[in-house]
Image (cartoon, rainbow, N blue to C red):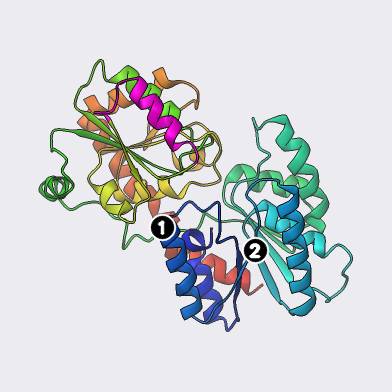
Amino acid sequence: MIEQFNRNNMIILKNLNYDITILANFKFGNTTSDKQTEQFFNELIAQKIKVINIPIPRKLKPLLLLRSYFIIKQLIKSENYSLIHCHTPIASMLFRINYLFKTGNNRGKIIYTAHGFHFYKGAPIINWFLYYPVEKLLSRYTDCLITINREDYKRAKKSFKEIKSIFHINGVGVDTKIYFPISSEEEKIDYRKQYGYSEKEFIIISVAEINNNKNQILMVEAVKHLVGKRKNILVLLVGKGPEKEMIELIVKQYSLGNYVNFLGYRNDICRLLQISDLFVSCSRREGLPVSVIEAMAVGLPIIATDIRGNRDLIKNGSNGFLVPYNDPILLSEKMEKIINSKEIRMEFSHQNIKDVKKYSEEIINVQMKNIFQI
């Protein structure tokens, strides 16, 4: 979360003369490689940023929550933080619980960026039962809430009236100096050769942690339907995660090994996008997916599931297609439609290059600087 989504925020705060302390779980649950995590840790230290490893879990695990609570409690007691910026519901909850009995100016200002509420239209009832009451209760201890999609913003404005400031910004921003369309078809062919891919292959790419929420099984099921009609497709699954072995087993059972490549964690996402022909996001839940925005910046046509966040980015039939997250046959049909039509690919590509401008880092950084200065 810190490395992928908060580098620019750290630069902004440094330029505003803040001393920065990072509290994060560097030990487990990270979507990057262990080597990358260690390199980032050392990079922060080299920048003279104080780093505290804290065992905040991504899921509700009582013992880890209790340990994290007391670490935070001690930090709040010993440090005089003027600003606390949280990025996960559990971390945000722990900080605000620590402020339940503090009054007046006896606490720092809390900003919470919600990267997608766990309660949303169509969410499991248990999510509403567990997460909504907590957010409602603790909203009175939130000075500023940042939402990154329209659905969350509307719900926050309606339900969390205790919060002084509620903003909607378009995610964390994409660096269009890094993510940009490839200059020519010849260059694309040349890069493909460097990776060992043929110019005749239609490359479909998906970038996400391999887990139940990212729903890569939908892609595999769709490919199973598609290969009977198209033999020149190649799917690149980029990412690591707890369900990688299971998805690999299903690919083997379906005899799709020649059509699906598992690339693991990669540092060359932009180049992989540039050599691809289509981006697919299969998620069951999103806030505002960075991977989709990066694919837009590169100019790829996109197929995404019809869920919150994706609907902010993809207008069905304009810059991509939206499909249900449980309909592999329809997904395969939309894939085939894009494969068969260069005109559709060009139309979606041009529209994405146009639409992505409002998601640029330059715009988001200005918005975040203004929020930090409120």
> Bounds of the magenta span?
242-259
Query: Which residue is the site of mark 1?
Result: 174
Relative to 153, is 45 above or below?
below
Q: Is residue 164 visible?
A: no
Does dot 1 land on a helix, a strand or a loop?
loop
Name the disc covering residue 155, or none.
none
Is residue 109 rendered magenta in the image?
A: no
Instruction: Determine which quarter of the picture holds residue 77.
Output: bottom right
Q: Residue at x 76, y 40 (%)?
A: 130
Q: Is residue 218 visible?
A: yes
Three-letter code for the amino acid on which mark 1 is drawn:
Val
Residue nearest the viewer, comparing 54 with 142: 54
Relative to 92, is 316 above or below?
above
User: Is disc 2 in contact with disc 1, using a CB cutoff of under 8 Å?
Assistant: no
Is residue 253 rendered magenta in the image?
A: yes
Residue nearest the viewer, comparing 54 with 115: 54
Query: Which residue is the site of mark 2?
Result: 54
Residue 195 percent across, percent down from the top left: 18, 47
Residue 75 percent across, percent down from the top left: 74, 73
Which one is closest to the eye, mark 2 or mark 1?
2
